[in-house]
Image (cartoon, rainbow, N blue to C red):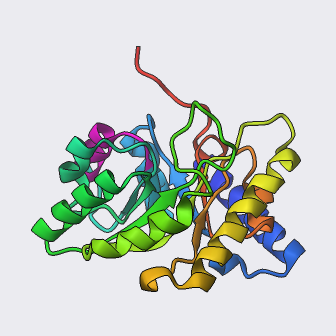
Amino acid sequence: MLIDNLNAVKDNIAEACAKVGRDAGDVTLLAVSKTKPEADIMELYEAGHRDFGENYVQELREKQEHLPKDINWHMIGHLQKNKVKYIAPYVAMIHSVDSLELAAVIDKEAAKHNRIIPILVEVNVGGEESKFGISAEEAPAFVAALADYPHIRFEGLMTSAPFLDDPEDDRPFFAELRKLSVDINSKNLNNMCGTTLSMGMSNDYKIAVEEGSTMVRVGSDIFGKRYYQV
C-alpha cells in the first residue's frame, strides 16, 4: 500500500507540473516519516526512494543509526541549537534555519566534520504566531548575512503555509515565497543564491508545485495518519 501511495503522489506531482509546463524531475519528494516505524521507511527504500524528512532530532538519530547510510535525511522541524551536533555528521539538508545564532552553530558543527551543510531559510509567509520562521521582509538581509558562515550553503527558502480547508487558498502564500526567492537571487546578496523552494505538504502540495515548489514534504498521503506510541 505504501508503494501505491508513493506512486500516487508522484503522479500528482507530474500532473501538477504538466499543468504549468514544468519538468516533474525538478521536484524532489520528501517522504515525511516522523513517528513512522523503520519498517515503513525500508519498504519505500527497497522500492528505490531515498529522500526522507524528519521533525525530531532524537527520532532522526535513531533511524539514521539503524537504516541504510545512503538515505538522504532532511531535518524539516524546528531545530534547537544544542541538538545540531547530533545530526551535523550526516544530515543532507536543514530546512528550518530561522536565526543567525542557529546558522552559526550549524557552521561550527559542520566545520568539525569537514562538511558544508546545505540549509534553507524558513520564512513564515502566513505571519502565524504559532509557527517559526523569519518574516519575508527580514529575509534579504538574513540571507546576505549567511555569507559569514563558510561551512553552510544557502540552498533556498522553506515555508509551511497555513492549513486551510481549501488548498487553493494557500496559493498566494506559495506565490509570495517564489517571488521572494526570485527577488533575493536577483540581488546577488553576498553571492548568496539558492533556487530550492521547500513548500507544500499533503494537503496542498499540488498547488505548491503549480506555484514553483522544487521540494514537497508529504507524510500522511504516503504513510497514512501519524502513529503515536501510548
**x and y, in percent, of residue 144 in the image:** 44, 73
Q: Residue at x 82, y 55 (%)?
A: 172
131 vs 90, left or right, is: right
Q: Is residue 98 above or below residue 27?
A: above
**x and y, in percent, of residue 13 in the image:** 74, 65
Which residue is at the front of the view, 94 or 184? 184
Which residue is at the front of the view, 30 or 213? 213
**x and y, in percent, of residue 203 in the image:** 74, 44
Which residue is at the front of the view, 76 or 34? 76
20 vs 223, left or right, is: right
Q: Is residue 82 above or below residue 50?
A: above
Query: To which quarter of the image does residue 109 belong?
Result: bottom left
175 vs 187, left or right, is: right
Q: Residue at x 62, y 40 (%)?
A: 220
Chief SS of the magenta region? helix
Q: Residue furthest left?
A: 112
The C terminus lies in quadrant: top left
59 is within the stretch colored magenta:
yes
**Residue 55 in view, yes or no:** yes
Q: Residue at x 78, y 80 (%)?
A: 22
160 is within the stretch colored magenta:
no
**Residue 49 in view, yes or no:** no
Q: How many marks?
A: 0
106 vs 112, left or right, is: right
**x and y, in percent, of residue 8 in the image:** 73, 57
Q: Which residues are magenta?
A: 54-65
Which residue is at the front of the view, 77 or 106? 106
